[in-house]
Amino acid sequence: MPLNRIAIGEPGEASQPDALKAAVAEFFSMLIFVFAGEGSGMAFSKLTGDGPATPSGLVAAALAHAFALIVAVSVGANISGGHVNPAVTFGAFVGGNVTLLRAILYWIAQLLGSVVACILLKFATGGMKTAAFAVSADVTPMNAFVLEIVMTFGLVYTVYATAVDPKKGNLGVIAPIAIGFIVGANILAGGAFDGASMNPAVSFGPAVVSWTWDHHWVFWLGPMIGAALAAIVYDMCFICRGTHEQLPTTDY
């Protein structure tokens, strides 16, 4: 059971150079991801004169987020594991792959990276604000909550299958591509309903800059539950490690 491997961490871990470097890497990876992903939406709005959402806009958002995430995961993989998502970090924590103290460092860095990216976007675009994630008019918060659970389950399941599983072999080389592709595919599936966040930090930055918090809990609770379920299911069904074995954080 992966929950048996959950660890708090040593008190001094948060100040260790490798942990701090990993947090900095998460900050920059998140900044890269959010700047490109959210920036694509702002560019589309500018080109269409703030027109209504269209299928082409959804495809553009999916491609931008997929490409940006492939890069963001790749550049952080050798330093922090390239989580680029508080939900992925939570899944790693639930599976016993990172300690709570390191997870907290990652969460702080990821949230700051998202906020800074949105502030830079606002400044660089002459005052345009990144649009906060919102539940569509014909979708209830509970519908969006379930959608976020399922989409994030797929994302973290992919992370475990391609990057965490010790049997992955050469499959780990394509992990960033697989992770980026599942995020892009999920945006195509869920973007019209709630924006398809799957990432609390991606939702947090635009919410701070625009100060819009409607149904914001959906974009935190849904991804965290989905990530935890994916970690537990994959670990119990396919990894089957000893209860005291722990993977190094650089494995993903």
Image (cartoon, grey):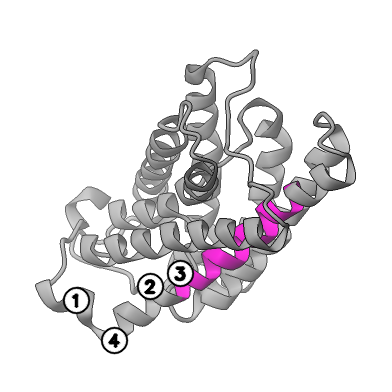
**x and y percent of residue 20 in the render?**
32, 79
Q: Which contiguous range is marked in magenta?
A: 25-41
**x and y percent of residue 219 in the render?**
47, 36
N-terminal label among 3 and 1? 1
Residue 14 falls in image quadrant: bottom left
Q: Report which residue position mark 3 lands on.
A: 26
Give yes or no for residue 29 being in the magenta stretch. yes
**x and y percent of residue 248 in the render?**
34, 74
At 33% from the left and 70% from the top, the residue drawn is 247
Residue at disc 4, secondary structure: helix
Give yes or no for residue 234 being in the magenta stretch. no
**3D distance between C-alphas at marks 1 and 4:** 9 Å
Residue at disc 3, secondary structure: helix
Q: Report which residue position mark 4 lands on.
A: 17
At 71% from the left and 29% from the top, the residue drawn is 192
Mark 3–mark 1 CB contact (< 8 Å): no
At 31% from the left and 64% from the top, the residue drawn is 97
N-terminal label among 4 and 3? 4
**3D distance between C-alphas at marks 3 and 1:** 17 Å
What amino acid does circle 2 point to? Ala
Question: 69 and 171: which one is in front?
Answer: 69
